[in-house]
Image (cartoon, coloured by chain):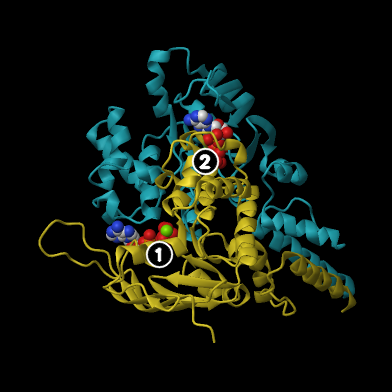
Amino acid sequence: MEKPFIKLEDVSFSYESGEEGPVKMLLPPILKRINLEIARGSFVAILGHNGSGKSTLAKLLNLILFPTEGKIYLDGKDITDENMTEDDVYVVRRKIGMVFQNPDNQLVATVVEEDVAFGPENLGVEPAEIRRRVDRALETVGMSEFKKHSPHQLSGGQKQRVAIAGIIAMLPECIVFDESTAMLDPKGRKEVMDTIVRLNREKGITVLHITHNMEEAFRADRVIVISDGEISLDGTPREVFSNVGKLRTVGLDVPQVTELLYELKSMGYDEVDYTETDEEKCAEMLAEIIKSQKGR
Amino acid sequence: MNALELKDITYTYSKKTPFESKALDGVNAFFEQGKVNGLIGHTGSGKSTLVQMMNGLLKPDIGQVVLLGKDIWEEPKKIRQIRFQCGLVFQYPEYQLFEETCEKDIAFGPKNMGLSEDEIRERVRSAAEFVGLDSTLLKKSPFELSGGQKRRVALAGVMAMEPSVLVLDEPAAGLDPIGRTEIFGGIRGYQRAKGNTVIIVSHSMEDVAEYCDNLTVLKNGRVLLSGSTGEVFRHEKELVSSGLGVPQITRFMRLLRERGVECADNIYTVEEALREVKRLLEERRGENA
Ligand SMILES: Nc1ncnc2c1ncn2[C@@H]1O[C@H](COP(=O)(O)OP(=O)(O)OP(=O)(O)O)[C@@H](O)[C@H]1O
Ligand SMILES: Nc1ncnc2c1ncn2[C@@H]1O[C@H](COP(=O)(O)OP(=O)(O)OP(=O)(O)O)[C@@H](O)[C@H]1O
Ligand SMILES: [Mg+2]
Ligand SMILES: [Mg+2]
């Protein structure tokens, strides 16, 4: 069997208390002995209540944070090894790109196209190739017409698209999207999701998608639910969303259609299969049930 | 009656530069007194720009902003006073918390209004209650709170001024489902208790369907549609072609209709859908009996 692309072994993490002093105090752990393997090319959605540790997990993968305990392997190599050099860290960040939660924190240049070029430039890509990548990335996110604009003059959702283009232009092997769709309108969300799915399916890029939107999680091939620093559910969208009760106890929800079907089932309509994830098929099923009531 | 009227508003950013962009183009929008009014529109449609017109942070190039029957630019020197009457909570307001404790942060607005100590204390207590902030949290520094808790502090800070019109730009973005329900519940509670007007900007069709009485839809700096939430959501095609949509459950009920189920075409929440489907199932049973 192929070795996992990313592997976490008993990873725990605590922030240090901010207080000044000779002894750094560790705060209570945010992540608790996480064990997780992610296959190359997979599309994983990560869900969890506010403060459950999702962004912390993402920052560990990108070596912005360092585990308090445990090990993280990337392509079989221990990236938490003490002997990691700066070059090694650089290689990790080149493989795993990250789009942060708030776009204001990651737009660096004064012109949109320069901002998108910033990443590839740092990777030492040739100018002609940079040009091509920047144009394609901006086209992918639908922001070509804004390429000469200043990022500060963009609306919230437009900034988010530029931030995504900046990561795409680096052609990483894996992209972590930390609530990258939170500020987009429904069409923008769908377009960005389509883009993410395409990057995954066509380019084989491994995707970790952190989101509060349950419908988006349906498009992943695996869903992981984090609750209070532990993995509480892990499986296909169908498997995970069939645990409606458990999802609710960890502060999450299910898509509206699933909720409707689940409630019907709880009311005794046993033919209802609320684990169906395709909207059209759900409609098909419910229409049949309603019509067949007649024949009883 | 309208608490706020925006009349024929036009606004252009970066005038006389190559990046000149007309963000609002002849917008007429009316927000009903005592209601929860939603403002929706695609990315870059002008929502945040419009919202900043409401309390005088931006001045329209052309047009009038009439708040409680009065043109807010009639006396430009008094424009700061307008912010007590029309309180604005920005997109991601938690980045603007700055006091040592949450209590002081929430008290900041009422203090600036020149209220007495007692009144300030009462305002802070009541605002914290609306947003569901525990009193033990009030003594903490905002920096020790989770994202959702910070959002509540920021919201309580504006509520504590008890503005006649409370404007919220994406109040639930980034919150988990429970956090969303609680924040919207708090906003509803405030609106009911005070009878004040609320304006909510949102990208979630599900949320506006659940919590707003009226909707105004922006498209490329113009008003595309406005009316009661039910009326606006009847225009699924127009909404979709403008980068928006209808709630998932509304779309689903349409799919049922397309499959020959005779269900109502004005369903916008799961609760309504459940009632309707139950009715259909029972009706069928009844026919057979
Ligand atoms: N720099 C920090 N110092 C101390 N505690 C922190 C720091 N950053 C985050 N925390 C705490 O760690 C916990 C997990 O935070 P994290 O940002 O990983 O959550 P999250 O799952 O991404 O939440 P959200 O959905 O709100 O983005 C929270 O309780 C948070 O308050
Ligand atoms: N400071 C600015 N300078 C120049 N143009 C701007 C500025 N702020 C916004 N714009 C432009 O004005 C238009 C409207 O922006 P606005 O922020 O009002 O949109 P929005 O509807 O709030 O979008 P979003 O949903 O993404 O927050 C956009 O095309 C944007 O690029
Ligand atoms: Mg986070
Ligand atoms: Mg905005």
Q: Residue at x 27, y 45 (%)?
A: B103
Q: Which of the pair B29/A197 is nearer the observer?
A: A197
Asked whether A121 or B59 is in front, the reply is: A121
Question: A255 or A91: nearer the eye?
Answer: A91
Q: Position of residue A133 (x, y in %)?
A: 57, 50
Mark 1 CB within 8 Å of ligand 1: no
Q: Is residue B9 left or right of residue A84?
A: right
Q: CA distance from mark 2 to mark 1?
A: 24 Å
For residue B256, above or below residue A9: above
Tell me: residue B239, above or below residue A122: above
Q: From the rendered image, report the letter of the chain displayed in cyan.
A: B
Q: Position of residue B143 (x, y in %)?
A: 28, 51
Asked which quadrant contains residue A82, the reply is: bottom left
Quadrant of ligand 3 in image:
bottom left
**What is the quadrant of the C terminus of chain B in the image?**
bottom right
Q: Residue at x 49, y 71 (%)?
A: A225
Chain A is shown in which shade?
yellow
Q: Residues within 10 Å of mark 2 (few under 14, many from 20)?
A: many
Q: Secondary structure at mark 2?
A: helix
The residue at the point 54 percent across, 34 percent down is A148
In the rendered structure, find residue A250 and report the number of the disc placed on it: none
Q: Residue furthest top?
A: B75
Name the residue tied to disc 1: A91
| Within-10-Å neighbours for mark 1: few <14, some 14–19, many 20+ | few
Q: Amino acid at mark 2?
A: Glu
Residue B259's spot in the image, x, y percent? 85, 63
Q: Which residue is mark 2?
A: A113
Work out whether residue A70 can be spotted.
Answer: yes
What is the chain letter for disc 1? A
